[in-house]
Image: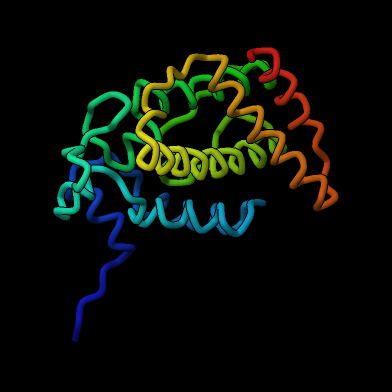
Amino acid sequence: MIKKMPGPPSYFTRRKDGFSVPSLQSYMQGYTNLFKAQISTKTLENSFNILNRQAWTNQKSFLSGKDEEGREGKCELCGERENTHHFLFECEEYAEGVWYIFSKAISEVENKNVQIHMFNVIYNLKIKGVGEEAEKHVFALIQECKRMLVKRRYDRCQNPSLNNIIYDERRIAAHWVNLVRGQILFQKYKGKNTTWLDKLQENLEAKV
């Protein structure tokens, strides 16, 4: 009899490779949270691929022998090793600022200190300590942001001149304004209330 893994291979390969992971139960909850989220099909597919370690990175390209551009597995923005965790959360030149500004905006809207953890981004675990309405919208926006980060990474690979952009607070806030605006339109299309998103949009627009 073939012995089956007690969970998805992506969980165990992440542990093997030394990445910080939540408990297996929490990891599996990430799948449930994802499929219950109010997001588009394309965004769902993107987040599902990330959870299953299927997002393409320069490190994967280098290890697979397909590093035709000579990137040597490094991030083109900061020069560090580019794995999924890096370009989605850790890059000091872009991703780190993305989540800092988002956390700051949520904290100001909610009037409490809110921090976005890597587990919220990579493993789809929900933000604790915010209201029910905020939690729902924040979770959806995190998924939309991951889709944006994947697209921008792809665009940088296709157009190297984009690697020279300096991502200051105003530029990153503008990216968030576009993401929130899209989510407001999506929610209105579904006939949902957007009061909380409107407040977040106003906060972010003030930072641009």
Left or right: residue 147 versus residue 208 is left
Residue that appears at 63% across and 55% down: 40
Quarter of the view holding residue 109: top right
3 in relation to 184, above or below: below
Residue that appears at 67% across and 51% down: 38
Question: Residue 66 at what x, y percent from top left?
Answer: 19, 53
Residue at the farthest bottom position: 1
Left or right: residue 112 versus residue 172 is right
Question: Residue 90 at what x, y percent from top left?
Answer: 34, 29
- Front position in the image: 78 or 118: 78
- Front position in the image: 49 or 63: 63
Q: Is the N terminus in the top left, top right, bottom left or bottom right quadrant? A: bottom left
Residue that appears at 16% across and 38% down: 72
- Front position in the image: 207 or 108: 207
Question: Residue 189 at what x, y percent from top left?
Answer: 81, 50
Quarter of the view holding residue 92: top left
Q: Is the C terminus in the top left, top right, bottom left or bottom right quadrant? A: top right
Left or right: residue 161 versus residue 201 is left
